[in-house]
Image (spheres, grey):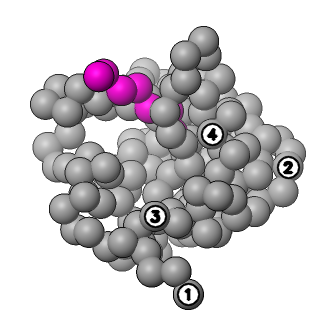
Amino acid sequence: MFGIGSFAVIFDEQQRVLLCHRRDYDFWGLPGGGVESGESPWQAVVREVKEEVGLDVEVERLVGVYSWPGEDDLTLTFACKAVGGELSASDESSGARYFRWNDLPPNTFQEHRKRVGDALRGECAALLRIPEGPSATEEARHVGRRREEP
């Protein structure tokens, strides 16, 4: 089955990026997830951010479209602006916080690092890229850093 994901790059006033820590794997990443039937990718990213980290966001622009043809996976990443809500943990994330670009946690998904870099370039045209490395799903599956519950 072909999957479509929508993820958000959210910067604060100090140009720090918001990452959330997954509950199922010991990785930090951008908030986001799968597009559900009946919604657009930009509606999905707004919903996913609210569900995962408690923030209300507005989509500002499309950062890039990323495709893993071998995995039947297509991901859209949007630059978003927080406009309300309160940063919080959820069923999917054990926490969320803002990080400076040069101080991202070592266990940040490689591909999510690249997407933050793409967003920082601030290009008006969206990037179309077939990543050379693993998707976040594939990286989590292979590294196997399953999160141990306390």
Which residue carries the number 2 mark? 85
The answer for how far apart the CA atoms under marks 1 and 2 are is 28 Å
Task: Give the mark nearest the N terminus, 3 or 4.
Answer: 3
Secondary structure, mark 1, is: loop
Mark 3 is surrounded, within 10 Å at the Cα level, by few (under 14), some (14 to 19) or many (20 or more) other residues, namely some
The answer for how far apart the CA atoms under marks 3 and 1 are is 13 Å
Which residue carries the number 3 mark? 24
Q: Was residue 42 drawn as part of the magenta stretch in this picture?
A: no
Part of the protein shown in magenta: 1-7
Residue at the image position 44 percent from the left and 50 percent from the top: 116
Task: Give the mark nearest the N terminus, 3 or 1.
Answer: 3
Secondary structure, mark 4, is: helix
Closer to us: mark 4 or mark 2?
Answer: 4
Which residue carries the number 4 mark? 48
Left or right placement of residue 54 versus residue 76 in this view: right
Task: Give the mark nearest the N terminus, 1 or 2.
Answer: 2
Q: Are marks 3 and 2 in contact (CB under 8 Å)?
A: no
Task: Give the mark nearest the N terminus, 4 or 2.
Answer: 4
